Image (cartoon, grey):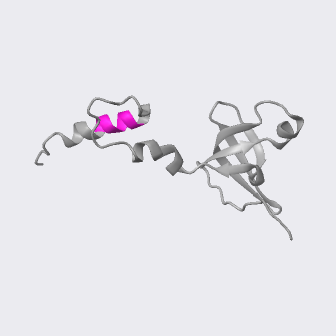
Amino acid sequence: MTFSTQTTTTFRVDDYVLYRDPAKFWRGQPGHTVVCRIADAIHYTSGVRYDLAPVTGGWISGAQGDYMRLLPPEDAMRDIDTAPLQSDGDVGGMTAAAVAWLTQHTATTAQRPELP
């Protein structure tokens, strides 16, 4: 029986990914896994390499897709998608992004629409 943990994912410029630096990981160094935005995709005959812009700053050139995992927008936006439609003043359990969305949404829907 053969097991494969390799995933094949197509990454695009501006996708957010979790990147693990294999050299740092295997040496046990800290900071081996970072969230990055894909800045460029370079196509070679042997495959695709990516230039990454870590969200904390810096630059990673020539990263292999095998060491990246896509961070879907649904995960980043889940708190907003599941926020209650009425805040009733209790926002203690909500993240700042959800509170901002709810505040903006209720402010725009509470006003009467204007005629052009």
Left or right: residue 114 versus residue 86 is left
Picture quadrant of residue 10: bottom right
The quadrant of the rendering that contains the N terminus is: bottom right
The residue lying at 37 percent from left, 42 percent from top is 83
Please state the horizontal and vertical placement of residue 17, each as a whole percent of the image. Answer: 64, 46
Numbered disc total: 0
The residue lying at 59 percent from left, 49 percent from top is 15
Picture quadrant of residue 57: top right
Q: Is residue 8 magenta?
A: no
Left or right: residue 29 versus residue 87 is right
- 58 versus 52 height, above or below: above
Judging depth in this view, the residue of 72 and 49 nearest the camera is 72
Please state the horizontal and vertical placement of residue 71, each as a whole percent of the image. Answer: 60, 48
- 83 versus 100 height, above or below: below
Judging depth in this view, the residue of 4 and 50 nearest the camera is 4
Give the residue furthest to the bottom.
Answer: 1
Please state the horizontal and vertical placement of residue 95, each as a whole percent of the image. Answer: 44, 33
The residue lying at 33 percent from left, 42 percent from top is 84
Span shown in magenta: 98-104
- Dominant SS in magenta: helix
Left or right: residue 91 versus residue 29 is left
Please state the horizontal and vertical placement of residue 3, each as a whole percent of the image. Answer: 82, 65
Judging depth in this view, the residue of 105 and 36 nearest the camera is 105
Give the residue furthest to the right.
Answer: 27
The residue lying at 62 percent from left, 35 percent from top is 55
